[in-house]
Amino acid sequence: MIKKFSLFVSFVLLTGILYAQVTPPTLGPGEYWTNLWSLSYDYQTNGSVRYIVQDPLNPMNLCAIQMATRDSVSPPGTNRYVWFSYSSDAGRTWDNGVEIATARFEGFPCMTVRNNIPLVALHEVDPTSRTFVYQDAVWGAGSFGTIGNFPQTPNLILWPHVAVSTNSNIIVAAEPNPPVADGYYSYWNGSAWSPHFTLTNTSGPSGNFSVESGPGGRVFIFGEDDFATNFTKLWVSTDNGVTFTLQTGSDAPPEVLNVGGQQLFAYIDGGKSGIYVGNDIHLVYSVYSDSSESLPTPPNTNWYKHAKIIHWSSSTGVDTVAGRYNMPNMTDTLTHALVTPVCQASLGIYNGVLYCTYTAFLRGNTQTVDDGSIVNAGEIFITYSTDNGNTWNTPVNITNTASVEEKHSSVIRNLVTPTGDSVGVFYLRDMKAGGWVNVNGWGPAPVYGIYKKLSGVIGIKQDLEIVREFKLFQNYPNPFNPTTTISYYIPKSSNVTLKVYNILGSEVATLVNGFEKSGAKEIVFDASHLASGIYYYTIAAGEYKDTKKMVLVK
């Protein structure tokens, strides 16, 4: 790993003070601490941002970032920094993070890769809020320098989102400072930054944009009009981010969804994420009804109606990723800051499979904070689609910490997985639920950057795990009520039976009985007609047999 000696010495002296102040987080199965942490800055963004990238030349190399503070008493925006950490073994171990810039109170970063080297856009508030773009010297050096002089006129911009086009242009979209209805974008052509160009009626703070690149010079900017209509806006470039055209009709997602007489809007608090799959744009974002309302008791509580995460592409249209229909325990009311019941979606693709992680809030998952308020605690879920986003599997809770909060997940957009490895996700473990910089009295606490490897944890088919033999996976969820998903993999076409038995050994259901082609399979078992208790499901395929236990709790 490359480090400048002077930087390394300074960092060692600094970390002797800083890292002694935090206790390493408790880790669950498949979790690894990235050595990124903050003493209190748990509000990272009110949307979706890219916090982790993979080295295209060596898939074992990962880089992650986190906004952080060194103390728990500084006012918001001061004594705040962006830290970078590096792994050369696919996320199993991470180096002690280094600060990307110094002394200007950096925040709200977004990371991508340019010429196979990590690149970070962020804004700084000293002496005034404005955007900078930094690139590492080489992969994992932790020695960042600015890319040119980012334009500061006619308006400063902040909360930047960044992408790199196929000819290595850097494209940044962000909100003006002070905020106005029109957003801006600028591009770096290898020698100079362009002036700011206007994104008409497409502006808003922190999580409002998703900026992504695709093949053949394609780039999109996805946002919304946060100052008037809250209508979504999709801008597309085919010339490496030099010019953008506002999309309309079937080339863009609906500006507002109309479902059962309700209008559902893509408010900023829910976040936005997207990728290119070939030439096709795929977007995921959170929506909820404009009839949702703030509740006076308790304070800082909102009632969200028809909250869901949706997927859109020009080839498939609109489909629901997560909502009440597949998350029946999702809460409707939230005592929290700048979130929705399902929010902060992050979209990636691996082996032709779309996968989406997001923050979700469940009924009963709460924590009592410093002033006695009972605050909802978020968890991270994952779901995936094998049919280009038309349908999505039952979401899986990958954190399962009812009284500790996880949020701000980020996946690698186009994953190249090392042999024998699997999909991973970066997220923050917040030891005090909520966002202390937004609600006085809730109190600060350490926030940790966690990387979780999902192989063997969720068992979601060959597509997200390399499987070369017969395998029956553990059902999800488990315990369940009243439905659960059972997945299995058969490497060659076979006659398959899949049956369910009660604790006395009596057969209660036959789920599969016939010839099946090779590949990954899944089936939803509905136990609404059965009593609570322990059940067993058994597969027989050729000479392969296996049995697993599941628990029905009503």
Image (spheres, grey):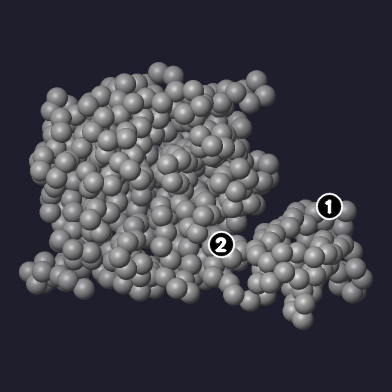
Quarter holding the N terminus is bottom left
On residue 399, the disc is none
- Camera-side residue of 23 and 296: 23
On residue 463, the disc is 2
Question: Residue at image x 73%, y 58%?
Answer: 523
Which residue is at the far left? 6
- Give the percent coordinates (x, y) of residue 235: 36, 30
- Give the percent coordinates (x, y) of residue 185: 25, 32
Can residue 195 be seen here? The reply is yes
Question: Residue at image x 45%, y 46%?
Answer: 277
CA separation, marks 2 and 1?
A: 30 Å
Mark nearer the N terminus (2 vs 1): 2
Residue pointed to by mark 1: 528
Question: Residue at image x 37%, y 25%?
Answer: 246
- Camera-side residue of 542 and 137: 542
- Camera-side residue of 234 and 295: 234
Q: Is residue 114 above or below residue 15?
A: above
Question: Residue at image x 72%, y 69%?
Answer: 493
Can residue 223 be seen here? The reply is no
Identify the amino acid type marked 2. Asp
Helix, strand or loop at label 1? It is: loop
Quarter occupied by residue 191? top left
- Give the percent coordinates (x, y) of residue 431: 43, 57
Q: Are marks 2 and 1 in contact (CB under 8 Å)?
A: no
